[in-house]
Amino acid sequence: MRFIQDCEIIAHDQTAPGHWRMCLRSPEIASAAKPGQFCMVEVAESLYPFLRRPMCFSEVDADSFCILYKLEGEGTALLAQRVVGQTCSIQGPLGNGFPIDPGFERHIIVSGGIGVATFPALAKALAAACKRPPEVVLAARTRHLLLCEDTFKALGCAVHLATDDGSVGEKAYAAQMLERLNPGPDTRVYACGPMIMMETTAAVAGQAGANCLVSLEAQMACGDGACLGCVVEATEEREGEKMVRVCVDGPIFDADAIDWEAHNTAYDL
Ligand SMILES: Cc1cc2nc3c(=O)[nH]c(=O)nc-3n(C[C@H](O)[C@H](O)[C@H](O)COP(=O)(O)OP(=O)(O)OC[C@H]3O[C@@H](n4cnc5c(N)ncnc54)[C@H](O)[C@@H]3O)c2cc1C
Ligand code: FES
């Protein structure tokens, strides 16, 4: 079930430089949303900008949900101006969401930068469904961009911090931290962050025989499978194309389903 609703903004705070958390009231969307799914957010009350912006469900409660977002450009700058008490039009929930499988012995979340936004909801679901809470690798460029540490700790997660500049935690990249945790065939890894971070994380997981799911980002227009604006190269052909649509086939994919090499060539990485 999906909705388009004007939702009341019930909280909106800056959580770190350039990063905001907005909570919205909607019992219907909150009760339908699954971890890993996303919504399309109308950023301004005016007709411009026309396109909604995709945002993950970061936290979900009985009658409300929160998004956690980074200021990127015009749309998110307009969104940051919205205030508590106003309404914001939300379309969702959209996409497939993370499968929750208690059959895995270990669950390791690997987050890079604002990629963390999708993980508080997942960590909560895993902590409730599995024998023990997930382990979390929280990686970012520098210490003030490490978000949600307290949220994960409150759920009982062991949190491993990594920064590119070594300002807190280990001076390491996310994939290196995962390697140090020795994942194995009994492990499921969940990764979200920049493409290169997900590719290297998937490689480490693959070498260890672990299952790896990635939450992909792509520029989106319709969010509904129609415009093909969000396609990503895949390893297997579907309906005559080696492409998947992030909005309806994802955003969660098995890492083996993504052609990382083709993506790097397309973007000259
Ligand atoms: C399924 C999904 C879930 C997302 N969830 C979140 C979230 O929870 N929190 C969050 O902060 N962001 C999230 N994003 C990314 C977010 O949608 C974009 O940052 C946002 O649309 C940028 O809008 P803007 O108008 O501010 O920037 P624009 O002016 O549209 O773009 C500014 C810059 O950001 C780049 N950009 C725009 N959209 C994307 C994108 N989707 N991926 C990579 N680069 C982009 C543009 O190329 C440009 O360089 C998600 C994206 C997807 C596809
Ligand atoms: S955003 Fe239009 S097909 Fe995915």
Image (tube, helix red, strand yellow):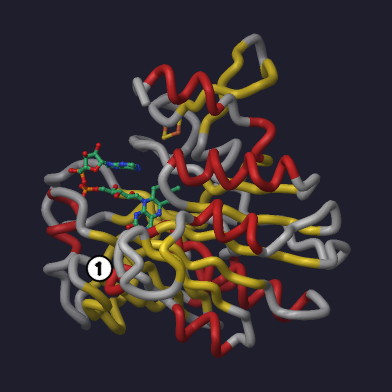
Residue lying farthest to the top in this orientation: 240
Q: Is residue 199 above or below residue 103?
A: above
Q: Would you place residue 13 above or below residue 140 in this image?
A: below
As helix, strand or loop, the secondary structure at mark 1 comes to strand
Is there any visible trace of residue 168 in the rendered image?
yes
Q: Does 171 sit above or below residue 131?
A: above
Residue drawn at x 27%, y 65% as measured from the top left: 88
**At x 44% / y 24%, what residue is drawn?**
264
Residue drawn where x is 77% and y is 49% of the image: 210
- Residue 128 image offset from top left, x and y in percent: 73, 80
Q: Is residue 62 left or right of residue 46?
A: right
Q: Position of residue 224 (x, y in %)?
A: 47, 37
Q: Within the image, what quadrant is residue 43 found in?
A: bottom left
- Residue that badge 1 annotates: 19
**Picture quarter with ligand 2:** top left
Label 1 beta carbon within 8 A of ligand 1: yes
Which residue is situated farthest in the bottom direction here? 154
Kind of residue at badge 1: His
Q: Quadrant of the C terminus?
A: top left
Residue 251 placed where, x, y %? Answer: 54, 44
Foreground pick, 3 / 74 = 74
Front one among 68 and 136: 136
Provide residue 76's location: percent of width, then percent of height: 20, 56
Q: Is residue 178 above or below residue 237?
A: below
Q: Is residue 128 left or right of residue 64?
A: right
- Hey, which quadrant is residue 23 in on the image? bottom left
Pointer 1: residues within 10 angstroms few (<14), some, or many (20+)?
A: some
Q: Residue at x 78, y 66 (%)?
A: 106
Quadrant placement of the N terminus: bottom right
